[in-house]
Amino acid sequence: MTLEDLVGTYTITGSNQSPDAAGYKGELTLALDEHKRIVATWLISGDQRQQGTGFFKNNILVINFNYEGDDKTIYKGVVVYQCITKDLLEGFWSEKHGNPRYLGEERCYRKGVHKEVLH
């Protein structure tokens, strides 16, 4: 798998970094910048935009991300995806000010590919 194989848009489902693990859905778009670094944009629950940049090696994608919360604070974190195939990414993430005893989790399915094909 190459970095270029990951470029595209994914439907995501995930759970937050908390003991009650509230779930969420959204969309992840992966692109490449002029230096062939991953540029990621998430749209969570239809209105929360997050962005980040990352790198890829041995089918592992690591992205440092940030977003502005409702309280106008900038939150930062890191997500690590295992690239199962170019159409399915399994990840876990943590925010700097999140609960350190828990990790968020995320699964990404390339848009236009049926989930049944990915299992």
Image (cartoon, grey):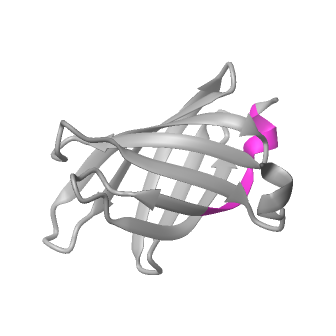
Q: Pick whichever, 119 or 43, lies toward us.
A: 119
Residue 15, quarter of the rendered image: bottom left
User: What's the residue at 76%, 65% (across, down)?
Assistant: 111
Residue 99, quarter of the rendered image: top left
User: What's the residue at 46%, 58% (across, down)?
Assistant: 14
Question: Compared with residue 19, is residue 55 higher up or lower down, i.e. above or below?
Answer: above
The residue stretch that appears in magenta: 3-11
Question: Compared with residue 60, is residue 25 higher up or lower down, i.e. above or below?
Answer: below
The quarter in which the N terminus is drawn is top right
Tell me if 50 is positioned left or right of 96 in this view.
right
Position of residue 29 measured from the top left corner of the image (x, y, whole percent): 63, 59
Task: In the displayed orientation, state which residue is furthest to the top.
Answer: 58
Question: Compared with residue 91, is residue 35 higher up or lower down, i.e. above or below?
Answer: above
Question: Compared with residue 17, is residue 116 higher up or lower down, i.e. above or below?
Answer: below
Tell me if 30 is positioned left or right of 71 in this view.
right
Q: Is residue 4 magenta?
A: yes
User: What's the residue at 83%, 68% (across, down)?
Assistant: 112
Position of residue 114 measured from the top left corner of the image (x, y, whole percent): 83, 64
User: What's the residue at 62%, 54% (across, down)?
Assistant: 108
Q: Is residue 115 magenta?
A: no
Q: Pick whichever, 83 or 39, lies toward us.
A: 83
Residue 21, quarter of the rendered image: bottom left
